[in-house]
Image: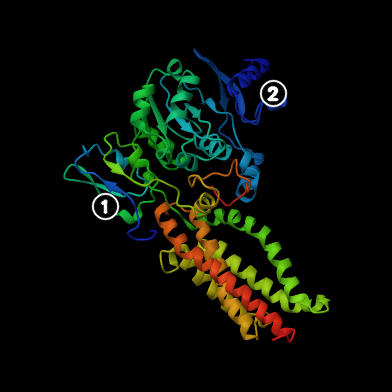
């Protein structure tokens, strides 16, 4: 297969989608190394080795919005030298997911059918329905899968099950959906066992490492808002009847900013990490407890943070634990075990408390300032 | 780890269940077990309402209020309308801490 022919394959494959691929040389991804000829045309072969660049991109996915546009083109790919009897694995077109999958397929000869999930991972896309029954049925037809394989079975990741109705795929496309393991690393064992998943392959865990890698994405959007909080605090503490005094802004404001930072860390980092050992099932309560304790301990450990004025002490214990609580509640989106009804219940109780607590804190702050200016 | 107790909307309609066991297979939290040839709920507090079981029950024997257990998504849907869904694309605040 020549370089030129390969390029034209990429062009065909793309269909209407995607950020990629006018036919120029650089646009053939580095992880493609050839093609398999099939009755339905050539299918790109992908390597199972990941490069430093792939890992660097994964790091960026974990920490920045880089992940929002990190895709592969939907369609059929080949790993190894698959033939008409080889298994077909279904995946999403989030490149991170695709990379993890191909990495685990070293030594196997399989087809990978990539659905158009708009760059979202299998699980989230299944919840949304883009990794779903209709997309799967359509994609089977589009890549002409029936001409490529003789069997009629597909291996769909277990976490794709919320989006894929196996019996509907069978009815409409004639393919029997087998739900494979939760994790790609279990695929070789699952296939070797004749498509049998052990009980542990079917369960989602949520280890401390799982939780740790999710925290940067909790923290980074908050830190943007934290800059606004910092400006607000310095302005309020610096404000005097005769203008903004820089010295007052720092001396009064800095402890507050630092305590705010403590509450962010408590809610968005400590609570997720310590999740199983913090009492209560409610995320809002977990976060509030950790926030309260963190603020208290910080003020005892670092005298410069300690507050003397009773009004400011009230604000510190009222407002900051609520910040931690709110951030902890946002972490429900990253967990593997929270359901919608429960989160709605928590929000219904806690949002009024957050708004009320913030309002009261602001009123107390105004009273404090007025007292400072000897108006009341 | 389990979430709040007794909030989950999962329901089995035993009369419709034929005992095929598909729900046991697709559930990632081992919520179901087989009891006397029919699916039964083993531990409802483990359910995260992902809807895999209901969507894969060809007999309509399972009902669940399917959705994402994600506070940002739910707040977003309360403010801007629409279903709470996961995913950041098409979102003005494109980099929320979601999936």
Q: Extreme front residue here?
A: A375
The residue carrying mark 1 is: B42
Residue extending farthest left: B36
> What distance separates the C-alpha of mark 2 from that of mark 1?
53 Å
Q: Residue at x 77, y 75 (%)?
A: A238
Question: Which chain contains the residue that carries disc 2?
Answer: A
x 50%, y 20%: residue: A142
Q: Residue at x 72, y 75 (%)?
A: A253
User: Visible in this render: residue A348?
Assistant: yes
Quadrant including the N terminus of chain A = top right
Residue A139: x and y, percent?
Answer: 48, 25
Percent from the top left, x then y, of residue A262? 61, 70
A364 or A291: nearer the eye? Answer: A364
Residue A198 point in image, percent of width and height: 34, 42
Are the residues tagged 2 and 1 within 8 Å (C-beta)? no
Quadrant housing the C terminus of chain A: bottom right
Q: Secondary structure at mark 1?
A: loop
Query: Would residue A372 be found to the left or right of residue A15 on screen?
Result: right
Q: Secondary structure at mark 2?
A: loop
Q: Which chain is disc 1 placed on?
A: B
* Displayed quadrant of residue A232: bottom right
Structural crowding at the residue carrying mark 1, measured as other residues with C-alpha within 10 Å and reported as few (<14), some (14–19) or many (≥20): few
Q: How is the image coloured?
A: rainbow
- Measured along the vertical axis of the image, is residue A264 above or below residue A157? below
Residue at the spot of label 2: A22
């Amino acid at each position: 297969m020549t370089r030129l022919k390969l390029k034209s394959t990429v062009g065909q494959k793309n269909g209407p989608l995607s950020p990629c691929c006018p036919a120029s040389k650089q646009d053939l991804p580095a992880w493609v190394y050839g093609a398999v000829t099939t009755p339905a045309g050539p299918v790109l072969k992908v390597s199972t080795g990941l490069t430093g660049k792939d890992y660097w991109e994964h790091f960026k996915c974990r920490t920045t919005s880089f992940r929002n546009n990190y895709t592969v083109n939907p369609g059929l790919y080949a790993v190894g030298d698959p033939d008409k009897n080889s298994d077909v694995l279904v995946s999403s077109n989030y490149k991170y997911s695709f990379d993890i999958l191909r990495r685990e397929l070293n030594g196997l000869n399989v087809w990978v059918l990539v659905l158009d999930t708009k760059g979202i991972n299998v699980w989230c896309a299944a919840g949304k329905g883009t990794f779903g029954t209709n997309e799967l049925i359509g994609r089977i037809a589009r890549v002409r899968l029936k001409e490529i394989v003789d069997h009629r079975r597909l291996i769909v990741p277990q976490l794709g099950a919320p989006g894929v109705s196996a019996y509907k795929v069978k009815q409409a496309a004639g393919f029997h959906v087998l739900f494979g393991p939760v994790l790609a690393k279990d695929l070789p064992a699952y296939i070797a066992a004749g498509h049998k998943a052990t009980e542990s392959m079917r369960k989602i865990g949520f280890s401390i490492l799982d939780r740790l890698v999710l925290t940067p994405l909790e923290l980074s959007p908050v830190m943007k808002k934290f800059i606004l909080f910092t400006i607000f605090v310095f302005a309020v503490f610096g404000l005097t009847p005769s203008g903004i005094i820089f010295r007052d802004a720092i001396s009064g404001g800095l402890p507050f900013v630092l305590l705010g930072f403590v509450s962010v860390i408590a809610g968005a980092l400590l609570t997720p990490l310590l999740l199983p050992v913090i009492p209560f099932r409610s995320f809002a309560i977990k976060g509030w407890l950790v926030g309260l304790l963190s603020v208290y301990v910080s003020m005892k450990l670092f005298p410069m943070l300690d507050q003397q004025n009773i009004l400011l002490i009230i604000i510190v214990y009222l407002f900051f634990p609520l910040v931690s609580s709110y951030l902890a509640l946002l972490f429900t989106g990253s967990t593997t075990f929270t359901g919608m009804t429960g989160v709605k219940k928590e929000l219904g109780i806690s949002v009024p408390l957050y708004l009320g607590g913030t309002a009261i804190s602001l009123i107390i702050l105004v009273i404090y300032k007025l007292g400072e200016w000897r108006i009341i | 780890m389990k979430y709040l107790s007794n909030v989950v909307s999962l329901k089995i309609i035993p009369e419709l269940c034929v005992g095929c066991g598909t729900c046991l297979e697709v559930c990632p939290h081992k919520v179901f077990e087989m009891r006397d040839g029919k699916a039964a709920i083993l531990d409802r507090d483990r359910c995260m309402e992902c809807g895999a079981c209901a969507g894969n029950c060809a007999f309509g024997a399972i009902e669940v209020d399917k959705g994402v257990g994600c506070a940002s998504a739910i707040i977003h849907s309360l403010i801007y309308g629409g279903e709470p869904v996961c995913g950041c694309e098409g979102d003005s605040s494109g980099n929320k801490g979601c999936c």
